[in-house]
Amino acid sequence: MTEGRIFGTDGIRGRAGEGWLTPEKVARLGRAIGRVMGSGEECAALLGHDGRHSGPELESAMGAGLQAAGLLPKSAGLMTTPGLAWLALAQDFRLGVMISASHNPAEDNGIKVLSSEGEKLSDAVEDEIERVLRADDEEPPKSIGRLPMDPELELAYLGHLLSTAGEGLMLGGMVLALDCANGGGSRVAPRVFGRLGAQVHAIGVEPDGDNINRDCGSTQPQALQREVRSRGAEIGIALDGDGDRCVLVDERGELVHGDGIMTVLALHAMARGELRDPRIVATVMSNRGLHRALRAAGIEVVEVGVGDRQVVECLRRENLSLGGEQSGHIVLGSDNDHIGDGIFTALRVLRVMRDTGQTLSQLAAPYQPMPQVLLNVRVERKPSLSQLPRTAEVVKRIEADLGSDGRVLLRYSGTEPLARVMVEGLDLAHIQAQAEELANCIAEEIG
C-alpha cells in the first residue's frame, strides 16, 4: 500500500477514484476504522455525503468496511458535515463518516471521520487506524450495495436547527437569498429559513453530481451577490459544499466574510452582557481589522494557527464561546457542541438583525479590513523561516515599524515549493514595499 501519512489536516482528500479514494481502498479503510473505533459489540455508524457523483459509491464502500468490522452502517444521505456531526453526538452513534471534499471541485472527494462526540479524531487515533490498515492483508470487504437513506435523520437535524438557533426567531416579511453550493445543505437549508417565515430565493440547490461549488457557494459568491441585488434581499447566505462554512452578503450586495461575522456576533454579545469572558478565538489568517474593531469594545482576540481544529481546541481550553476563521467557519462554543455549522451561524446573525433592527451593513460596519499584500517566492528548500538571518532581521524591523496595527506572516505552502509572504498595515504603498523587500530576502537566501 501507499507509503506516507494517509490522513491530512482535514481527513483524507484527493481525486475520487484515485489513491485512497477508490472503492476497494475505502472499504479497507472502513474495516480499519471499525476495528479501531468499534467496541467489539454491535453498534451503529452514521454515514453521509455531499452532492458529488462519487459520494454514494464511496459511502457504500465505507459501509461495507464498517459492516465487516461488526458495525451497523446507517446513511443520512445528502447531508452537511455539521449535520452529521450533530446527529452522531445526539443519537449515540459510535462514529460518523462524512464523504465530502468540502469546497473542492466535483472531481475531488474526501473522508472525514468523526467521534461519537461529533469531533474530528486526534492524531493518535488516526495513526492507529493507519497502523491497522497497513497491517490488513485480508481481501477487501464485499460490496453491500447502496445504503438506504433514513429520512428521519434529516428531519432530526432540521428540528435541532429550528429549536436551538431558530427558537423564537421570526423571519416573516424578510426577503432572503440563499446559495447552497449544490452541496450537502441543498435540501435542509431552504427548509430551515422557510419554516421561520422568510421569503427564500435559493440558488445552488440542484446538485447533479458535477455542479457542486461550480460558480457558486462561499468561495464564489458572485452569483449570490447578483441575486441579493436583483431580489432586493435583506441578506444573502452562502454555504460551502459540506455546509460548515458560511459567508454573508449585505443588503447592498457587499460581502461579509468570517471576520465580519465574528465582529457582528461578538459586539452584540458584549453589548448584551452575554460575553462572559471578553475574548474570542481567530486564526493567524484573520485580518487585523478584526482585532481593531473588537479592541474598541474591550474584546480581545486569542490567535491560533490555521484550521478549525485549533479554534475548537482553544475554545475548549479557555472556555470561550466564539471563534472562527476568515473563510466563514464559525464555531459558537458549547451553544452548538463546538460544531461549526454554516446554517447555525447564519441563524445567529439573523437573530442579531432582528434583535437590533439594524441592517447587516450597519452591524458589520465596525469591521474595516486593513490592506494586505500577499507574495509568493519559489524556494529550493524549506528551512525554518525564522532561522534565515537576513530575513529574520528584516522581519524584526518591519514589525517594529508597523506596531500593533500591522503584522508580518511568513509560511510555506504545504503543497508547492513556495514561501508565502503576507504584510498587513494601514498604508498599502508602504506595506507593498515591505513585502517586496522580504520576498527578495527570502529569494536570495533560499530561492
Image (cartoon, helix red, strand yellow):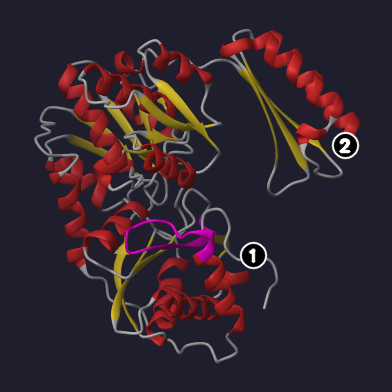
Q: Residue sitting at 27 percent across and 41 percent down?
A: 344
Q: Which x, y percent locates residue 11? A: 51, 59
> Which stretch appears magenta?
106-124
Who comes first in sequence, dot 2 or dot 1? 1
Disc 2 and disc 1: Cα gap in Å?
27 Å
* In the foreground, 251 or 345: 345
Quadrant assignment, res 52: bottom left
Q: Residue sitting at 16 percent across and 22 percent down?
A: 355
> Residue lying farthest bottom?
139
Q: Is residue 116 left or right of residue 351?
A: right
Residue 113 inside the magenta-drawn segment: yes
Query: What kind of residue is marked 2?
Result: Ile
Q: Is residue 96 left or right of residue 22?
A: left
Query: What kind of residue is marked 1?
Result: Arg
Residue 446's disc is 2
Q: Which x, y percent locates residue 316? A: 37, 43
Is 399 drawn above or below residue 28 in the view shown?
above
Is 374 drawn above or below residue 241 in the view shown?
above
- Say which element carries label 1: loop
Residue 183's disc is none
Q: Which x, y percent locates residue 167? A: 12, 39
Quadrant assignment, res 418: top right
* In the foreground, 370 or 317: 317
Q: Which residue is mark 1?
A: 5
- Can the viewer see residue 18 in this picture? no
Which quadrant of the figure contains the C terminus?
A: top right
